[in-house]
Image (tube, grey):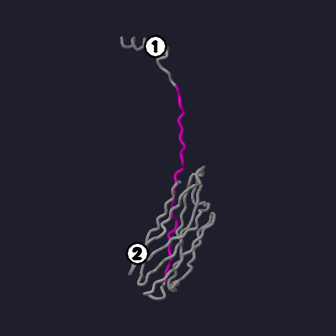
Amino acid sequence: MRNLIALALVVASPALFADGNSASATAKASVNIVAPLNLIATSDMNFGNIVVDTYDKGGKVTLASRVGPNSEPKAALTNFVNTAIFTGPKIDATAAFFHFQRDERYENVNIIIDPLVTLSGGRGPDVKLATTHDLPADACGYFHNPHGVVAKHFSVGGTLDIPGGAFGQKSGTIKVTVAYK
């Protein structure tokens, strides 16, 4: 019996809805998927071994960094004020080196680098690092890029402000953020 009622409704449905009591329409659905940002640090910053001229006076030293398209960063210690490179065991100075990927359709990317970093540990007061960079970012070949994705890279250097009485191993963290505008 139920089957007969269901069959009668199916057969009669065009006649039931043909009198203007219903209507239908369609709409398209779409989305623009943006490639995610990807950021990797591939080199830490290291000033190596620095000696101050006078223990209680402190000093400054700058780590200048530069990187070009598809190349590794070049770093050099410069602008020594009451400081020098330690003549004992040599540690090469290295800049912090960052690679990122972005969607090729969206060039406007904010790159935010901590402007001032505290390096602590060792003995005496903390050391302050005023960061510098070589932005705008250059093209790089670090990533295997899927179609539609662009890779860029940049380096971060800075100037250490060493207060009097500071010595020993000092360390801190440079925070870098990349975000679409």
Going by the picture, which residue comes out furthest to the right?
69
**Residue under numbered circle 2:** 120
Specify which label sits upstream in the sequence, 2 or 1: 1
Q: Residue 114 carries which label?
A: none
Categorize mark 2 by other alpha carbons within 10 Å: few (<14), some (14-19), many (20+). some
**Residue under numbered circle 1:** 16
Q: Which residue is drawn at 44% across and 68% down?
A: 173
Quadrant of residue 118 within the rendered picture? bottom left
Distance Cα–Cα, label 2 vs label 1: 81 Å
Q: Judge from the rendering whether residue 119 lies leftward or rightward of residue 153; answer left or right.
A: left
Q: Which residue is drawn at 43% across and 74% down?
A: 119
Q: Where is residue 27 in the image (x, y as percent from the top left)?
A: 53, 31
Give the dominant element type of the magenta stretch: helix, strand or loop: loop
Going by the picture, which residue comes out furthest to the left?
1
Decide which of 22, 7 is in the foreground and name it. 22
Q: Position of residue 139 (x, y in %)?
A: 62, 60
Q: Is mark 2 on a helix, strand or loop?
A: loop
